[in-house]
Image: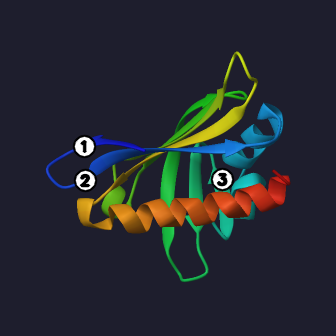
């Protein structure tokens, strides 16, 4: 994991998760509403370039899709909530030598919540692995 400061309070974190699947399969799970609702949020809808993420606990966040590179990278900018104008990125990294695939998650977090957010991402990615069969 890597981290760096975003502003006075929040810091950027980068987490890497090895996965055993194709880049095409993984890209579908990180870029499409149906894929994201399998592991990241309970419901995801799209309105233009904006994705609305809903969770069963009533939390709802909206993010604009600002970058999408097929089989490689998806970047969202949060447009509301505590994280407005911060980013969530999913990067598919394929090792050129070994062909090993990893999902890199870039997020932001309050320093005191770092451990909790890391555990949350580990849990979410474990759901992803179950759906992919990785």
* Residue 120 in picture, x, y percent from top left: 51, 66
* Residue 101 appears in view: yes
Residue 99's image quarter?
top right
In the image, taking residue 131 as reference, residue 104 lies left or right, namely: left
At x 71% / y 27%, what residue is drawn? 70
15 over 113 or under it: above or below? above
Number of residues whose C-alpha sits closer than 10 Å to that of mark 2, classed few (under 14), some (14–19) or many (20 or more): some
At x 68% / y 61%, what residue is drawn? 126
Q: Between marks 3 and 2, how big is the CA–CA gap?
A: 27 Å
Snapshot colouring: rainbow
From the image, which quarter does the N terminus lie in?
Answer: top left
Question: SS at mark 3?
Answer: strand
* Residue 95 in picture, x, y percent from top left: 67, 23
Residue at the far bottom: name it: 57
Asked if disc 1 and disc 2 are in contact, CB closer than 8 Å, the reply is: yes
List the residue tagged with mark 1: 6
At x 75% / y 62%, what residue is drawn? 38
Residue 24's image quarter?
top right
List the residue tagged with mark 3: 46
Residue at the far left: name it: 8
Disc nearer the start of the sequence (3/1): 1
In the image, taking residue 70 as reference, residue 90 lies left or right, namely: left
Number of residues whose C-alpha sits closer than 10 Å to that of mark 3, classed few (under 14), some (14–19) or many (20 or more): some
List the residue tagged with mark 2: 10
* Residue 37 appears in view: no
Question: SS at mark 2?
Answer: loop
Residue at the far front: name it: 98
Disc nearer the start of the sequence (3/2): 2
* Residue 55 in picture, x, y percent from top left: 59, 74
């Amino acid at each position: 994991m890597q981290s760096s400061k975003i502003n006075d309070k929040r810091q950027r974190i980068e987490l890497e998760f090895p996965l055993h699947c194709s880049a095409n399969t993984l890209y579908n799970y990180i870029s499409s509403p149906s894929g994201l609702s399998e592991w990241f949020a309970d419901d995801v809808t799209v309105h233009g370039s904006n994705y609305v993420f809903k969770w069963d606990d009533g939390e709802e966040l909206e993010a604009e899709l600002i970058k999408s590179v097929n089989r490689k990278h998806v970047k969202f900018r949060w447009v509301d909530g505590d994280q407005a104008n911060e980013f969530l990125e999913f990067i598919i990294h394929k090792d050129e030598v070994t062909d090993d695939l990893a999902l890199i998650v870039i997020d932001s977090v309050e320093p005191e919540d770092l451990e909790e957010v890391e555990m949350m991402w580990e849990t979410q990615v474990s759901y992803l692995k179950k759906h992919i069969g990785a």
